[in-house]
């Protein structure tokens, strides 16, 4: 073996610096966390639906969109008359809100769960939280209206959006973390719930109901969905929630 060949062989056997590898891979490695139809079809598809309904609200006839929102709302009146329709359709609208922030929210709070547990399980967690939190807040409102504690107008405010669903998935993700990371994520989630409430009219009845719905959804994910997911898959994979 010549001296030149021996030198090339020695260089080939040397381990490649992990720092060099990380630097070369980091710009592209981040792309796997962006929702896409291959790795996170539920998250990606949901964002497409929300984009479509947001564009509809922007460009369609206001009279038509107002009627659609009224029919989709999960207020007490609609839940009594059309419970299934309102429960499903209420989760596809972002009235008065921008679509882009929800891309980040879904990338952080929904996509990690889907990469670990799959689209069907993530959809089950998301929609179970949406339904449970909606019923947990609106059924007491219906009871108070029937008891004449609240006026009939309290059963007709617009109750729309996806926040109950993603707070449920966020709560489940918090449970799946460990140690200090779980504590930090829990504080961040509780602070986010409080910030949403304070940014609205915190003394109004609809804001209080929304606050209770957010808290209910987050803790349903933390105390029910998280343990259920851990029992289904106790061994975290390479794309785990952490």
Image (tube, grey):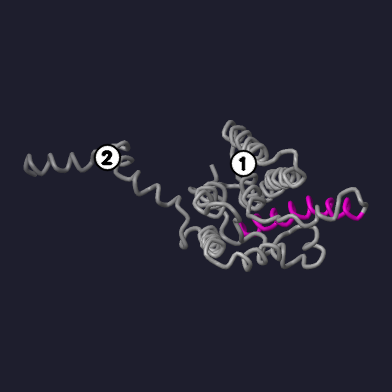
Residue 28 spot, x, y in % from top left: 35, 49
| Highlighted magenta segment, given as a residue range | 121-146
Q: Quadrant of the N terminus?
A: top left
Q: Is residue 145 above or below residue 69?
A: above
Numbered disc in front, either 2 or 1: 1
Q: Is residue 32 above or below residue 63?
A: above
Q: Is residue 143 magenta?
A: yes
Residue 10 spot, x, y in % from top left: 18, 39
Q: Is residue 218 magenta?
A: no
Residue 186 spot, x, y in % from top left: 63, 36
- Please tell me which of labels 2 and 1 falls first in the chain: 2
In this view of the protein, which residue sits in the foreground, 2 or 150? Answer: 150
Distance (Cα) linking label 2 and label 1: 36 Å
Would residue 201 appear left or right of 56 to someone viewing this image? right
Residue identifier under label 2: 16
Residue identifier under label 1: 174
Which residue is drawn at the image coordinates 48% and 48% (left, top)?
238
Residue 189 found in image quarter: top right
């Amino acid at each position: 073996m010549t001296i030149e060949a021996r030198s090339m062989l020695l260089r080939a056997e040397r381990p490649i610096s992990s720092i060099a590898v990380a630097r070369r891979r980091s710009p592209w490695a981040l792309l796997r966390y962006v929702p896409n139809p291959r790795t996170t079809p539920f998250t990606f598809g949901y964002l497409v639906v929300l984009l479509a309904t947001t564009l509809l609200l922007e460009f369609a006839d206001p009279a038509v969109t107002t009627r659609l929102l009224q029919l989709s709302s999960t207020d007490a009146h609609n839940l009594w008359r059309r419970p299934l329709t309102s429960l499903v359709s209420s989760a596809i609208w972002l009235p008065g809100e921008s679509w882009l922030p929800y891309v980040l929210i879904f990338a952080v709070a929904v996509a990690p769960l889907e990469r670990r547990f799959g689209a069907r399980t993530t959809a089950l967690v998301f929609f179970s939280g949406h339904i449970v939190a909606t019923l947990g807040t609106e059924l007491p409102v219906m009871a108070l209206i029937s008891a004449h504690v609240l006026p009939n107008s309290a059963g007709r405010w617009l109750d729309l959006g996806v926040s109950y669903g993603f707070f449920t998935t966020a709560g489940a993700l918090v449970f799946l973390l460990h140690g200090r990371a779980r504590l930090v994520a829990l504080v961040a989630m509780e602070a986010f719930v409080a910030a949403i409430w304070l940014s609205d009219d915190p003394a109004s009845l609809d804001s209080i109901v929304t606050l209770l719905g957010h808290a209910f959804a987050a803790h349903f994910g933390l105390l029910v969905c998280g343990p259920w997911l851990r029992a289904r898959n106790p061994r975290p994979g390479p794309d785990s929630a952490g």
